[in-house]
Amino acid sequence: MWDEVSGHHAAPQLGLFADPAPAHQTTAPFTFIDLFAGIGGFHVALKALGGECVFASEIDKHARQTYQANHGIDDALFNDDIRAISTDKIADHDLLCAGFPCQPFSQAGKKKGFKDGEKSERGNLFFNILDVLEHKRPKAFILENVRHLVNHDDGNTFATILDYLDKADYQVSFKVIKASDFNVPQHRARVFIVGFDRCSVDTRRPFVFPTPLLLTKTMSDIFNAPCEKKVGFTLRVGGKGSVIDDRRNWEFYRVNDEVRRIGLKEATEMMGFPADYQFPVSKTQAMKQLGNSVCVDVVSAVAKSTLHYMQQNLRGNDMEITRNKGELSELYAVIKLIHQRLLHYGDAQGNPTSDAVRVIRIKNGDTALNLNALDIEIIHADTITKIALSALFSSEEISALAQEIKAGKATFSNEKITQTTELLQLTKTKGTSGDKADFHLDFEEGNLLFADQGIGIKSFLGANPTLINASQATNFIYEISGLNPDAVDDINHIETKSKIKDRILAILNAGGQFHFYGCENKTYESNLRKVDTAMPSMMADALLAFFRKKITKYLAEYPKTCLAASDDVTVVHIRLRDFIQYSMLGIFPNQTWDGNLSANGALVVRQDGELVFYHTNHYQQLKDYFYQHAFFDTPSSTRHRFGQIYRENNKFLFKLNLQVRLG
């Protein structure tokens, strides 16, 4: 009987099997991406099911050679370091696949899990997958890892993974499957995690894992000669060579009463790859690559069930639309702007002034709204429609909507908002990947007309709005000198409520010193240098001051609190004001910045629902308000992989993450 663990995220159950897709079931064409791609086990299985690979990522140069030799993927679609690419550069896709690094969780490894600081913190690379899921929203995903992931750290690591996937609004199921469950004579127990986007797939019906097959193929078939073992050892990487009767043996078999070592031909077949699969590397590398790969037959079975479920349960256009507070706030701002037309500038404290502009046109995606006296002219797809202003929200309904958003859950639906967006043909409320503007305005100020002005929205109806979002790209790296290596593990195991501060202080107390080493994302570092050549090191120093609590949280405190008397505090204030303006209106951390602004201003939705306006026409007020109210926030250190010592290139390194909100 096979060993199994399966279940759904909300209530894991043992031994649950549902009916798979019919054996004859064919799938419609679909696109997929292949993360931590190795030599292409997922690719082989999914291509055979009708899939098109639109992006792959693999850092190991030898594995990349093998992948390229067999799949001929375009260089533009074949990334190396998953940490170094913006999710905006990844193509849209239906299915995400990833066999993320297993060494931190494997029984043969050190089982450090998320705290693995070796080889670029391989244990935390799961969060790169999460970033892609949250930003690209594929309909489904399949993840694969060693079975010990389920029980690592008494189940806490796996519970954390499931919780993050659930919060990303994916319905998740998982199951430990052996290769021998699908007629491959190899133990190779791996956990498969399958998830579906609840917004695009109706997940009320339980997902179907494939039913195991009768094992008819044995190691005798693999060797093409009588073998004393029916099911082979798990093919794996490394390990010590040993004699056949050693308990550590995993590579020797008795075949025809002779001891034979597993070879490349046998290993290729045991992993389900075609016999003609090309390995343009050494035999040692090829065996390592196969041991690191996924079993093609198992992936094929799981993928067939996943695709069948996804395609049979796609939601239609009549589904109830749920939006988060940020999306609702942005729609609220547009609707309120349509009503009031007159938009007052804000002062340095966020209060409206007597200066105002008159809005005459709003452009949102492919739709333009001309605001006339009593009606709204909607221009969309070369058609013009007029509706009366009275057909939209009344002033009372707008006020009630602001209160509903403030009191609402993280995501919820509002039927009137849905009706209004359909009526106005509003197709988007977010800026594009290279645009800081959420919509564009034409407005009059005095006798001047300002056309096509890109405007971002910052709303206080939900959580404090972000000026710089936390991501891998906003990690700052520090080299630690003078630290005794014996102190590293003790410092990393500090788990107090203020663990980041306490780890920093422990490093300093142990004689360690922090030196800015560089931004994790070199594009962001280059962008910051375009603001000022000293900006990366300046922000690194300010960030360290925040995490060690030399300042409370506001960026504007840093110059007057932390700089030496000889420093020109006024100059640093000026530089930081520029940094905030450019971060808000121009800079994306993971995209090369050309020095121009893609937005001209911002619309702030106050907690009382009123709107105040900031624009580069009044740049002094804009800079004053956003700089004085910009504060450092502390994102999840697990999610963004910072706050512990790790070793790379024979250096002790430490990361801190930059996230800035508006207070």
Image (tube, rainbow, N blue to C red):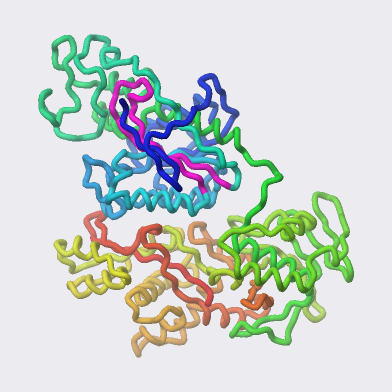
Q: From the viewer's side, name the closer residue of 627 and 342.
A: 342
Q: Is residue 81 magenta?
A: no
Overall secondary structure of the magenta stretch?
strand
Q: Quadrant of the N terminus?
A: top left
Q: From the viewer's side, name the closer residue of 577 and 270.
A: 270
Question: Is 292 drawn above or below residue 461 in the view shown?
Answer: above
Total numbered circles: 0
Residue 622 percent location from the top left of the image: 61, 79
One can see residue 569 in this view: yes
Residue 124 percent location from the top left of the image: 35, 52
Q: Quadrant of residue 279?
A: top left
One can see residue 65 in this view: no
Q: Quadrant of residue 652?
A: bottom left
Question: Is 424 drawn above or below residue 565 in the view shown?
Answer: above
Q: From the viewer's side, name the closer residue of 130 and 79.
A: 130
Residue for point 23% across, 26% down: 233
Q: Magenta region: which residues?
A: 170-198
Q: Is residue 192 magenta?
A: yes
Question: Is 127 drawn above or below residue 41 in the view shown?
Answer: below
Question: Is 31 drawn above or below residue 325 in the view shown?
Answer: above
Q: Name the side, left or right, on which 620 lies relative to 640.
A: right
Q: Name the side, left or right, on which 183 lies relative to 572.
A: left
Residue for point 24% across, 34% down: 237
Q: Quadrant of residue 299?
A: top left
Residue for point 42% across, 34% down: 16
